[in-house]
Amino acid sequence: MRRRSSSNTTMRFVEPKTEGQQSRAIVFRTREQLVNQRTELVNALRAHLYEFGYVAPQGIGHLWRLAEIVEDESTELPVLVRDICRDIPDQIDQFEHSARGIEEEDRRAVQGSFDFSTLANHVGPITALAIETFPPPMQTFKCGRDFAAWLGPVPRQKSTGGKQR
């Protein structure tokens, strides 16, 4: 009978993240949280105004329409609602300003990196920051397929022929 060794020879080890990567991860997640909070506020303002029959399209780009409705004295909004809704665009601006500041600081931290510049030209700055921050060094992957596997499950691709499942 053959005896098994106690270590698995197919096991791969990755380098621990650097302090810089860990710091950028916190910055990246904080920025994401600020953007989510901003979105919540925009949706809350839309919902408040919708209760009184004022409708605006979804998206941060239409915030100005909501602000105009709140500021327009001819709209039939109760004073209490108008006062509450006037504060929301200011809060949204604060979240926007904070998120931009964090994003700029994070960009400056990796600006000199050749990898970041190349990535940013192909996938955009936010995605490039995520790739610089979260995965282990690209040298640890044998090929792009290994990196894709590290990222996790991907949605099924449509079949070009045959039955669709």
Image (cartoon, rainbow, N blue to C red):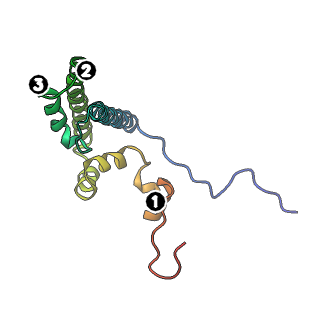
Looking at numbered disc 3 in the image, what kind of residue is underneath it? Answer: Glu
> Which percent across, then down, holds residue 127?
31, 50
> Which is closer to the viewer, label 3 or label 2?
3
**133 up-or-down from 151: above or below:** above
- Tell me which residue sits at (74%, 50%) in the image: 6
Task: Give SS at disc 1.
Answer: helix
| Quadrant where the C terminus is found in the figure | bottom right
Relative to the observer, which residue lies in front, 3 or 150? 150
> In terms of image quadrants, where is residue 89?
top left
Q: Which residue is mark 3?
A: 73
Q: How many marks?
A: 3
> Which percent across, then down, holds residue 135?
43, 48
Task: Give SS at disc 3.
Answer: loop
> Which is closer to the viewer, label 3 or label 1?
3
Disc 3 crowd rating (10 Å Cα; few below 14, some 14-19, many 20+) is few
Kindly report the distance in space between the C-alpha atoms of the residues bearing marks 3 and 2: 15 Å
Q: Which residue is mark 1?
A: 148
Which mark is on residue 84? 2
Looking at numbered disc 2 in the image, what kind of residue is underneath it? Answer: Ile
- Tell me which residue sits at (21%, 18%) in the image: 79
Residue extending farthest to the right is 1
Whichever of labels 3 and 2 marks the residue nearer the N terminus, that label is 3
Kindly report the distance in space between the C-alpha atoms of the residues bearing marks 2 and 1: 46 Å
> Which percent across, then down, holds residue 158?
45, 71
Which mark is on residue 24? none
